[in-house]
Each structure stands twice: as structure tokens, then as C-alpha cells.
Image (cartoon, helix red, strand yellow):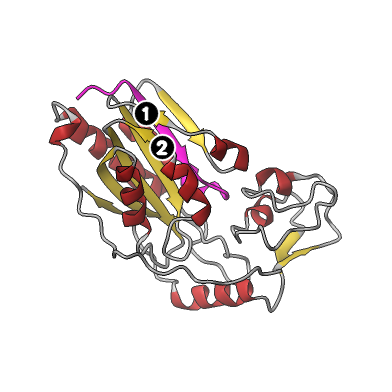
Amino acid sequence: MRIQSLKLAYFSPTGTTASVVRAMARGLDYAVAEEVDITLPEARQQPLQAAADDLLVVATPVYGGRIPMLLEPWLRSLRLDRTPVACVVMFGNRAFEDALIELTDLVMAQGGVVVGGAAFIGEHSFSNEAYPVAVARPDAEDLHLAETFGRKVREILDGLASVDEAAEPAIPGDRPYKERKKGGPVDFIAVGDSCVQCGTCAEHCPVGAISADDYTKTDAEKCIKCCACIKVCPENARTTKPGSPIEGFAKWLNENCGERKEPVYFF
């Protein structure tokens, strides 16, 4: 089937998901491609529409074995008309559990036809110098495999007369999905004296949790613990508080999820 345009939609607070999506786009090799970055709040106010001759890639990190809860309204606002879709999740070397099947279910409910799914590995949001987890991933091999996944999706579509011929991929996961943990707000971010109030952290926060009046203040009620503010700080002024639950989980991940996991595809 002939694809008129490629739409790349991704939520990527720390940039790992975006890097995999761009590698996929190289493998897909369509002339017309549009990036739809839904990381920041204002971008998620705009519903995305795609036709039957578009290809949509939807990609998100995994939070606790599920897709991020804040993405559900945007995903439910998708306006798809038998649009072929490739679904991608990014996990921090622990497990993607029910995130990929949840994403595919939501996309299909809005009129999408899922032609492929994949799970890739990115450096865990909680990874730090003391407790590294999947550092520097996706690496060159991961990105090569993302390109390969893109080429495979292209081969499938090129072999179809219409999207109605597409076989539904066997996506792993459970229904009902894993129950979300009911953890409350966590005050886990320390801001040191090296902070120069540049505002980079606030610019990258996907939920607007950092005060525009004082960039050292983070609203724990809004914070989704993505740690984007820590990773983008040019002065390395933001860190995880010692003894916080986030540091404790980072230690557990470091001790229990050190063995390298590899990307997986589903067609």
C-alpha cells in the first residue's frame, strides 16, 4: 500500500524515546515525515488526526509496567481512520509488562490498525552515578535495531494492497492491565547552590511542576518522577535526595536489573 506521509508521535521527557523514533524513521525511509512531540503540556492539548494512507508511529516510555497515565486523554483524542500504526514502548531494563498491549488497545479503540509493536531499552530515569541502570541506552546497537524495525514495518506495508489485509500482531501482556501503584507525592529532588536559575529544568518539565518564580521549587503533587529536570540541568544542580524512595528504588534496580536486555519486535 502507498503511504502518503509518516507521523511520529512521542512522549520523551529524557530524550531516549525520541532517539528510537528517529532511528525508526530512517528505516521507514518515507519522503514526508512529521514529528509530533507530545512531551510538553501544551502539545497534548492538540488532537492528532491521521488518514488511512498515513503511517503513525506512537511511542512512549513505560512507567511501572504501564503507559504514563497523563497520556491517556491525548491517546483517547486520536482521530484515526483505519490508519496503520506502529506502537513502541521504552523501558529502563526492568520490564515493559502491560504497557505495549495497553498502548495498542488504546490506538485500536481510536480507529488505528496496529501493524507492528516493539519494546526498546533506554537509560532508566532513576539511573545516577551511584546507581547506574542501562546507562547510555539506547546505544548504537539499539538504534540499529530500531532502524531494522522501521524497515520491517515498511516491508509489511509495501506488501499490502490495503491496510485491511494487515495481520494483527501478537502483542504480549495481560488484560486487565497491571494495577497502577497508588503512591503519593514524593519530595525527592535536591537543588544545590550551583543552580543559576536558568530555567532549563522548567522548560523541559512535562507537567509544569517547576515554579517559574523560583526554579528550585518543584510541586511534588504534579511531579511524575521522570527526572528530566535532573538530567537536563546544565549545572548538575539537581540531584536525587539521599535516602529518598527514588534513590532506594534506583539502588534496587542497579542490584537486580543489571543484565542487559535487548529490544523485541512483534508482527
Q: Nearer the viewer, residue 254 or 165?
A: 165
Report if residue 157 is visible in the image: yes
Would residue 200 be found to the left or right of residue 69 on screen? right
Q: Residue at x 27, y 27 (%)?
A: 52
| Residue 13 is inside the magenta segment | yes
Q: Amino acid at mark 1?
A: Ala
- Give the quadrant of residue 29: top left
Q: Nearer the viewer, residue 195 or 136?
A: 195
Q: What x and y, as percent, mark residue 148? A: 29, 41
Q: Residue at x 60, y 59 (%)?
A: 224
N-terminal of the two: label 2 or label 1? 1
* SS type, badge 2: loop
Tell me whether the residue at label 2 lies in contact with that at label 1, contact meaning CB atoms closer than 8 angstroms. Answer: yes
Q: Nearer the viewer, residue 92 or 111?
A: 111
**Label 2: few (<14), some or many (≥20) within 10 Å?**
some
Q: What x and y, as percent, mark residue 32? A: 39, 21
- Give the quadrant of residue 24: top left
Would residue 150 be found to the left or right of residue 94 on screen? left
Mark-to-mark CA distance, 2 and 1:
8 Å
In the picture of the structure, the residue carrying the numbered disc 2 is 78
Would residue 82 be found to the left or right of residue 24 on screen? left
In the picture of the structure, the residue carrying the numbered disc 1 is 50
Q: Residue at x 15, y 43 (%)?
A: 167
Q: What x and y, as percent, mark residue 198? A: 81, 44
Report if residue 263 is visible in the image: no
**Label 1: few (<14), some or many (≥20) within 10 Å?**
many
Would residue 43 be found to the left or right of residue 80 on screen? right
Q: Magenta region: which residues?
A: 1-20
Q: Amino acid at mark 2?
A: Leu
Q: Is residue 46 above or below residue 41?
A: above
Task: State the mark number for residue 166.
Answer: none
The quadrant in which the N terminus is found is: top left
